Amino acid sequence: MNEIGGIPLFYLEFGDIVAYFSPFTLALFLLALVFSVFVIVSRPERQIDIAFGADAFFAKDISLAELRFRRFMAIACGLACMGAMVTGDVFDFTLFVSLVGICNVGIVAAVKNHHVQDAAYQYGLVALAGTVPLFSAAAIVVTTTGSLSMLELASPGAPAVPLIARALLVLGVMGEGMAPFYAAKAEMFRAPGAPYVIMCSLSSLLIFLRVTEVVLLL
Amino acid sequence: MTPATQKSRALAIAVVSALAGITATALTLAGALPPHADAAVLVIAFPAFVLGLYLYWMAREGEADIPFVGY
Amino acid sequence: MIAELLFGTFFGLLLLGIHRKVIARIQRRPGPPVWQEILHMLKFSFKTTWVPATASAALFVGVVLVAIGIWTAALAVVLSGGSLLIVFAVYMLHKIVEHGFGLSSGSPYGKFGGVRSVISAASEIPLFVSVAGIALFTRSLIISDIVAYQEVHGPLLLTVPLAGLAMYLVLLSKMPFGPFSIVESKELVSGYKTEHFGVWRAGLEVCNGLKTYVLLTTFLLVFVGTMPFLFLLVGMLVLVVSLSFVCALCPMLSPYDSVTVQTIIAGLMLAYVSILVVVS
C-alpha cells in the first residue's frame, strides 16, 4: 500500500530529510496554511456572556499584550502543523507533534480565567505524558529498521516496522489531543479569541489525520 | 465604501471566479490542463463565486428602509 | 466539473428536503415541500447581510469559503477516484468548520454549538474503522481501486457489513434532526449556525447540499460499487429515506448521552476491526 494518499506530486529535500507533497499531505498542508493566515489577518471576536440573574450581558475584550502572545503561539502552532503534515521523516514528525502540544498550551495559557488555566494545565500533563510513547515509537523504528525515512520504509523490500512502534505512535498522537484524552481540551475552548482557539482543535485533527497515513504507510 | 461600490465589487468577484472556473473546465475538457488543476481552480473559484453572486444580488443600491420603531 | 458541482449542490439540497418531508410524514405532519431546502438557500441569499460588530470578521466570512471549498475538493476527489483518506480528512475537517462558525461570532449560542461539535470527536472513529476494514480487503485506499475490487469480488457491503454499518452511523451523525445532531439543537437557537445569517447562511446551505451529495455518493461507491448514474441517484434516495426513518423515530440525545453512545459505538467498532486484523 504505497499510495495511501495518492501519488506524491513533488518532493522537497532538506539533506536526507525529504518532505513529500501527495494530494493528501498537500491538502492538509494547505488547510493548516489557510487557518494560519486567518490567525494573522483576523482580529479576535468579542465574546458575549450573559450575566445570570440579570437582564444583562457583557463583552470580553482581549488586551493587546495577550493578543500578541497568543497570536504568536497560534502562528507557531500553524507552522508546526504544516511541518508535521508534509515531513517524510518519523523523528521529524514526532518532534513537530510534540511542538504542536506545547503551542496548544501556549495559546490558552495567557487567558486569565481559572477554568481555562486548569484545563491547559491538565492538557499539558497529558501532552507531556504523550511524548514518551511518541519518541519511543521513533526510537523503536530506527533501532529495528535502521532508517527513519517514511519513503524508504514504505518501499517494497524494506524491513518491516514492528506493530508496537505503530501502536505507540498512535498512542502518542492521541495523547496530544484526540479522543478520549480530548476531554481535557474541551474546557480550553471557553477561552475567547476564536482564530487562536480554533488552531488548537485544527492542529489535533490534522496530526491525527496525518498519523493515520503514517501508520498505514510504514 | 458606498453600497454601489460594494455591489460592483461583489459582481467583479463573481464574474472573475466564474470565468476562471469555466476556463479551467474548458481547458481540461480540451486536454490542455490536467484534471487536478481544474479541481484546484474550482476549490477556490466556486466558494468565491457563490458568495460574490449572493452578495451582489443581495446588495441594495438605494436608500435603506426606515426601520420599524413600533407604534 | 462545473456541471457536477452545481448538480451535486441542488440534488443534495433536494435530498435534505425529502429528508424533512419523510420525517414530517412519519410524525403525521404535512411537512414542507420537498424543494424547501433549495428555496431556503435562495431565500437567505436575498436577505440583507452584514458582519456582526462582535465577530472576528475575517474568520466569520472566511470559514464560509472554507466550508464550500473543502466539500468542492471532496467532490473532485470522489469524481476522479482519488484517495478515500482525503474524503475522510474533509469529513473530519468539517468539524473545524462547525467550530469556526460557532466561535467566530462571539455569540454564546454559537459558541456552545461549536464546542458541542468538538466534544463529539468520537463520532469520527467509526469512519476510521470502516476505512481500516476496507483497506484490509482491498489493500488500497484509492477509490478507483476499491471500485475495481468490487467488480471482481462483489459489493463490500456483503464482505464487511459492519464497516458499512460504521459508515452508515457516520452519515447518520451528520444528518439534521437526527439523534446525534446536538450541534444545532434548538435549546441553542440554531447551534453553530445561529449568527450566520443572510448570504453567509446561504453559503452554509450550499455546503450542506454538497456535503450530503458527496457523503452519500462515497458510501454507495465504496460499499456497493460502480453503477449507472440513475441507479446512483435512486440509491441515494433510498439511503436518505432510511436515514429519515431513524431520525424521525429517535429523539435527539442530550449532549452527554450523545457522546457516551458515540464512544460506545466507537469502542465496539475498534474491537471489530482488531478481530478482522487478527483473523486476516
Image (cartoon, coloured by chain):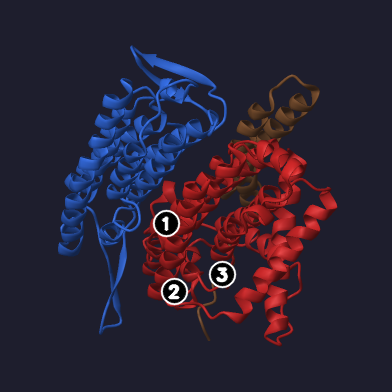
Chain colours: A blue, B brown, C red
Callouts 3 and 2 in the same chain: no
Measured from the top left, where is residue A74 in percent x and y? 29, 41
Measured from the top left, where is residue A44 in percent x and y? 32, 51
A199 left or right, relative to C136: left
* Residue at image coords 25%, 85%: A53
Q: Nearer the viewer, residue A76 or C45?
A: A76
Q: Nearer the viewer, residue A112 or C174?
A: C174
Callouts 3 and 1 in the same chain: no
* Residue at image coords 41%, 58%: C121
Mark 3 Cα-neighbour bin, 10 Å: few <14, some 14–19, many ≥20: few
Distance (Cα) linking label 2 and label 1? 14 Å
Q: Amino acid at mark 1?
A: His
Is residue C177 visible from the viewing direction of this image?
yes
Q: Name above or below for residue B33 compared with residue A188.
A: above
Distance (Cα) linking label 3 and label 2? 31 Å
Image-quadrant location for residue A122: bottom left
User: Label 2: which residue?
Assistant: C188
Secondary structure beneath disc 1? helix
> In the drawing, what numbered circle is on residue C99?
1
Is residue B1 visible from the viewing direction of this image?
no
Distance (Cα) linking label 3 and label 1? 36 Å
Mark 1 Cα-neighbour bin, 10 Å: few <14, some 14–19, many ≥20: many
Q: Nearer the viewer, residue A150 or A43?
A: A150
Q: Considering only order in the chain, which callout, 1 or 2, is on the residue closer to the N terminus?
A: 1
> In the drawing, what numbered circle is on residue B66?
3
